[in-house]
Structures are given as C-alpha cells and as structure tokens.
Amino acid sequence: MTGKLNLDPALVGQARELAKRAGAPVVKLARTHTTVSVERAVLRLAGLDGADEDGMPWVNRLTDAVRESTGLEHGVALPVWDAMLTGGYPDLRTLAVDAAAGLVKFRLPAGHEGNAARDTAARSVKKGMARIDAQRAERDRMLAATSDPPMPWIYLIVATGDIYEDIPQAQAAAREGADIIAVIRSTGQSLLDYVPEGATREGYAGTYATQENFRLMRAALDDTSRELGRYIRLTNYASGLCMPEIASLAGLERLDMMLNDCMYGIIFRDINPVRTFIDQRFSRQVHARAGIVINTGEDNYLTTADAVDAAHTVVVSQLLNEYFGREAGLADGQLGLGHAFEINPEVPDSFMLELAHAQLVRELFPDAPLKYMPPTKHMTGNVFAGYLLDAFFNLCGVMTDQSILLIGMMTEGIHTPFLSDRDLALENVRYVRRAAGRLGQEFRPEPDGLVARRARQVLDESVDLLRKIGSQGLLNAIAAGTFGVTKRPPDGGRGLDGVVERADGYFNPAADQLETTPLEAKQ
Amino acid sequence: MSVTGIVRPYGDTTGDGRVQLSFTLPVPFGDEAERARAEGAALQLAAKMGLDPAMVVHAKGMGPDFTFFIVYGRVSHLVDLSAVTVAEREFPVLPAAEVNLRIRSALGRKLVVVGACIGTDAHTVGIDAILNVKGHAGEKGLEYYREIRVVNMGSQVGVADLVARAAAEHADAVLVSQVVTQRDAHLSNTREMSAAFHAGFGLQRPLLVVGGPRFDPGAAADLGVDKIFGRGTTPSEVASYLVHALTPESPDAAQRGAA
C-alpha cells in the first residue's frame, strides 16, 4: 500500500528497533524458564486428555505428581517417559491415574535410560505435531473446496454458555453473513489453572473453552462452510493461566484464530507478568505451527483510558506484539493486531481522529490482518445513537482497509445480543460496504491536514514511550503502570508459583520441535 | 408541564398515547401467506400489550424461522404519577470520576481496599468481577479507580492472614466474597471474620463488606459487617458505597472515626 500519511520510514524503523530492545530481555526470560501450563501442554500434545472424577484434568494430576517428586526444572517429559518405560505403562492416562494415587516413583534418568526416555517422549509429542500439521492442511483443503471470503471479514460473537445453544446460533450467524465466529469464554476461565473437560452446557456469560467444545463447533461450522461454499473461521481465547494448553488444543482441533495478547492477562486479570510472557511465547509457537491467526487485545486499553490520550499506547503494544509474535515464528499474515473505535463522539473531529488512528495502524502493519473493534465505551443505551455510531465505525473500517471487523451491536452493554440485534448489525455493515466499500481507494487525506498530522503525532508519541520502556525495561514499565491504569509488579499477580527456572538439561520435546518449525509451515 | 396527575405517552400531540416497539417472533416470513400470518401474529401481540390501534411498519425475515417487527401504536393505559414508587437506595451510584474526586478531597490519599475469598472457598469470580480492571457488566473493577488502591489476596485466605494484611496495608475497607454455602459456610465464615476484626481493631476497624449470591442483604448487623451485596452487584455500586461510608460527610464514617 502506498502511504497516505507521509510517515517517516526511518522513524518507523526506529520504532521497531525500540520494540525489539524492550522485548528482547523478556524473550530471554521465556527461553530460560518454564511453567506448569507449558509442561501440561507437552502432555496434551502427546495425547493425554480426560479428567479425574472431580473434573481435574489428568495433565494437571500428572504434572503435579512430577513436580512434587523431581520438580519441573528439567521438564515434565524426562521423568514421565522414563516412568512409562520403566513401569511398562501402556499409555499416559494409566500412568497419570497411578501417579495421582501416589503409586509412581519419578526420577531423572541419566545416560542410556535418559536417551531412551527422551526419544520416546519426542516420538509421542511428534504425533500431536503431526495432527496439528494435518489440521493445517485440512484448513487449506477446506478453503480450496469452499472459498475464502474477501476482507474485511465479518466477525460475530456467540456467548450462550451452552455449546449446544452456541452451535445453531453460530450457524445462523454464518448464514446471515458472518465470516468468523468467536465463542466467548465463561467469565473467569482465564483465572482457572486447568482446562475444563468435555462438552459444557453451563457458563457465566460465555462458554468454557474445552477440547470437546472446540471439536463440536468446528465440525458444525465445517458443515455450514460446505453448505454456504464459504469457509467460516472459528475463534477462541488463548489467554489466562492456561494459554499454552488452550493454544495446543486449538491447533489439534483446527481453530482458525485465537485471542492471544502479550500483556492483556497481566493488566486486566492480574496474572503474573513473568508467567504470562513465558506462556505467551510457547502459545505463539504453537499458533505459528498451526497456521492460526492471533488477535491481540489493544482495544482493551481504550476501554480503560481515553482513546485520544492513550492512542500511542495502542501502537506501542502492537509493536511489542509484533516483535514477540515474529520472534515466536508467526508470519505477518498471522498477526491480527487489534485496535478500536472508542473516541468519545462528543469530541470535535472525533471521526477524523478515528480515521487517523486506523490509517496509521494500517500503514505501520501493511501485511497484518488488522482486527478493528467497534465502540463499546460510548454506547449509552440509546440504541438509535449506537446504531449510528456503529455505522461510522463500519465506514472508518472500510475506508482504512481494516481486515477483520468485529460487528458492533446497538445494544452493546445492555444484554447479550438479541437475534434481531445481530441481524440489524449485519444490515448496517452490508449497507456501508455496498455504499462505500471502495471509498478507501479514493480517500487521500491532505498531506498536512488534521488526519495526517494526528497520525504522525501518535507515531511520535509511540516512539517516545518505547524509548522510555526500553530504558527502564518492559517488566519495570508494566510495574510502573505504563499500560492501562494498573501497576503490575513482576513478583505479583496470579500464577507466579507455576513459574520454574529451567535447569541444565531441561528437556521439552514440544519446545524443541516448535523451535525448528520448518520454514514452509510459516507460510 | 405537570409532574403529578395522569399522563399518557406523547408522540406528537398531548394525550395521543403513541409508542414504538420492536420484537422478534419465531415465525417464518417466506411466501405471501406466511407474511400475512406473521404480521397478524405481531398485531395480536401488540393488541394484547394494549396497543390499539397498532400498525406493523416493518417486518423482516431473519433466516427461515424468525421475523423481526417494528410496530407503532396507541396505548390505552394511563400513567398515574402519584402512584409512582422510587426504590430508595441509601447511597447514590456515582461515576468513577466522582468517586475519585470524593476520595481525593475527603481523604487526601488513596482509599485502600483489601479483598479476599475466605475459608475454603475457591470461587474468586465474584471478588474478581468487583476488583479486577476487567470488571463486570460493562463496568471496570475497583482497580480501575485511580484513587482506590486494591490488594486482592485471592482465594482460600485465612481470617488471621486477612486481619494481618488489612492492618499492614492500613485498609479502609475489607471486601470478602463467599460463594460456597454448604452447611451455611458463608455465614459462619463471615461471623468468624467480623469477630476477628472487631477483636483486632475495635472501633478503628476497617469497613467490612461481604458479597455473594446467597446472602440476605438485610443480615449485615446480624453478621457483624457493615454491608452485604447480593447477586448482580456491579463495581460502581461497591465503589459508591465505599465513598458513601468512608468519606467524612457521611455520619457512619464520622462515628467510627475513619478518615
């Protein structure tokens, strides 16, 4: 895309360099530590699923048992597959049951026995990787057999709490024009340190992310994709304390997009920063392998801070998400960087400022499938005014060539959308696309007009903030409350007790195989 | 304009009684016969709701099974303003900026809130909905308020630890969430907690607030706490209550000497 804002390429390059400088120490941390969820993801990739009678997954029971006896400094794989070999276990489930009952003595095997355990572990995990690869190929096959809808993709949410209610709603939304279905998770799942099991019918304001729910919804949307001749993408959330495991399940069950931000859990859910950065790196490696597009959560910053004052924090976070994402192996086409239309409509020129922000992000990340979020903060309950605001959001989205439009509901903040809310919202976006879909091609802001000047100002402020973060360190910046309004120190928050420094000889067959993801798998 | 007496909805003429409504019926809107039946169904509902005459101004099929309607009509109902009852709340719900301002001007420092789930209760959904920035029901949690400092101790916190932490943090208020109600655990845990605070702090104790889906909001005095919040409570209600109870112009706060 040719630039419309006269951004200084040197300044853009400098911004990326500064993001790298801020992020590199955190990547080092992720390379030298592991977490309970990373280790449980290894077991999931090796095929261990199911839960005990209390609903606690066997991956948790087995990981806890290993942690109690040998610790996790060397990873879960070495002691687990050693126990498999020496105990003659037929499968991981049988071992997990015995381990939970305290019947297994784990150890760190050395020499020949260590090699045997490592080889077996690598073979087991490879089966999971092969399934992820096969699902990626299946997505390509489905896309070829149906069709890939043109951008912007229309993104709609279902959130009934009951997977068997979600399915017909999702299928109806697809028939009405949705290209992407997101299943909202049950409130608070991000704070559970385990992934619930099975098909679930009860959730609070959303449906639990489980492997079975993933499978059921993907199968239903495959049927609908074939019916419509258009591939319907499925989205869920790889966030919270179980990010690596949920990413793995998403890869195994062919989800297409996952919410996966580098800092969201830290800021909004008080999850420990160190835990988050370790977990997000592994989860992004899995997403890279699986061909999953991540969606980052910058829109959230604007729900707590003023959308004009905090515009540059969005850009800073996008640059950090881009750095962390690329470092983990994601292609630019997998970086669904987020932003939002949240400026107070009472502000003069608010639409022009929105255009400036949206166009800036488009030009900074030309190959990223940008995800643009509709107004939520200034939806007042006046559904008529809200419908108008959503139309302006849609217009800004098509004018600035956004890739994914989350469709705004006029009843935002009132209730989970009625069937008619969704239908009216789709009517809104269809009208805007029909009426002004190609306006972007003719939209040329004045070189020194308000839009271009505002965009350059936001970029300047972003570079200043990145410089500050680089000099104090990202963890310190988060501790100082740079993002959002909360201070999150590196030794605070949930999940720190699940962080373990890797010892010499740490072994993680999944991480090994992900680090060497073949280039062709990266698009 | 009169604020007492009898009124009717106002369209464009006093007393015309005109209203608008929209709704969806699970009826198809396909061929002509189906369309006629759908509109008839909408008019029947409008009539039963007291709209007479009513007019379907818009009907649209949504998928094979549903139809959306916009209906205008005249209601025959009268509104008796003298019979309007307004639910009394002991405190007004304030916007975040107002809460922050009240704290800043009254306390001259941040208001400190220590929150926890006590006993064996591991259900932090409630306390997190109130405390986390993420919040609940479209509202940001207490962490979002610049003038409130939140210490969220998480779940399964012992009463002694909670008392000690409240003292160490100079807590103005302690928020306790209780979801599990087996053998009335929520009541016994709350009594144990309030007794410990009364014993440890005397009159200088922090404000004690509990919340959970199974509490009787009227039982605060019985349980030895200052306030009970039930199901559906939002962060701004809690923040507004804290400001009401803890800023000096309120009599409660003056009584307990908190400032």
Image (cartoon, coloured by chain):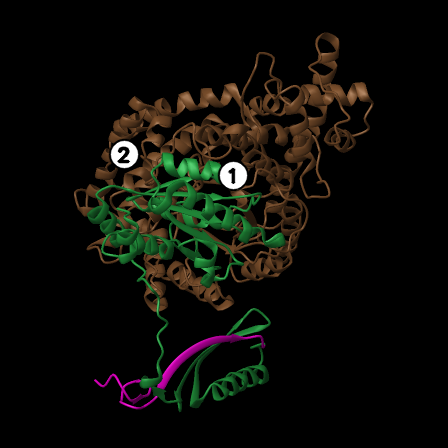
Q: Quadrant of the N terminus of chain A?
A: top left
**Hey, which quadrant is residue A470 in on the image?**
top left
Q: Residues within 10 Å of mark 1 (few under 14, many from 20)?
A: some
Q: With A422 as the anchor, is B5 left or right in this view?
A: left
Asked if residue B253 can be seen in this view, the reply is: yes
Chain letter, brown in picture: A
What is the CA distance from the residue labelled 2 to the residue labelled 1?
A: 45 Å
Query: What is the residue that sits farthest to the left in this orientation?
Result: A448
Residue type pointed to by label 1: Gly
Chain letter, green in picture: B
Residue tagged by mark 1? B158
Is residue B12 in the magenta section? yes
Q: With A423 as the anchor, is B77 left or right in this view?
A: left
Q: Nearer the viewer, residue B89 or A202?
A: B89
Q: With B119 as the anchor, is B176 left or right in this view?
A: left
- x then y, percent, for residue B135: 42, 50
Residue type pointed to by label 2: Ser
- Which of the chains bears the disc numbered 2? A
Residue tagged by mark 2? A462
Q: Residues within 10 Å of mark 2 (few under 14, many from 20)?
A: many
Q: Which residues are magenta?
A: B1-27
Main SS class of the magenta portion in the image: loop
Asked if residue A339 can be seen in this view, the reply is: no
What is the secondary structure assignment of the residue under circle 1?
loop
Query: What is the residue that sits farthest to the top in this orientation?
Result: A111
- Which of the chains bears the disc numbered 1? B
- x then y, percent, for residue B15: 30, 91
- x then y, percent, for residue B183: 63, 53
Would you place residue A449 above or below residue B69 in this image?
above
Q: Nearer the viewer, residue A52 or B155?
A: B155
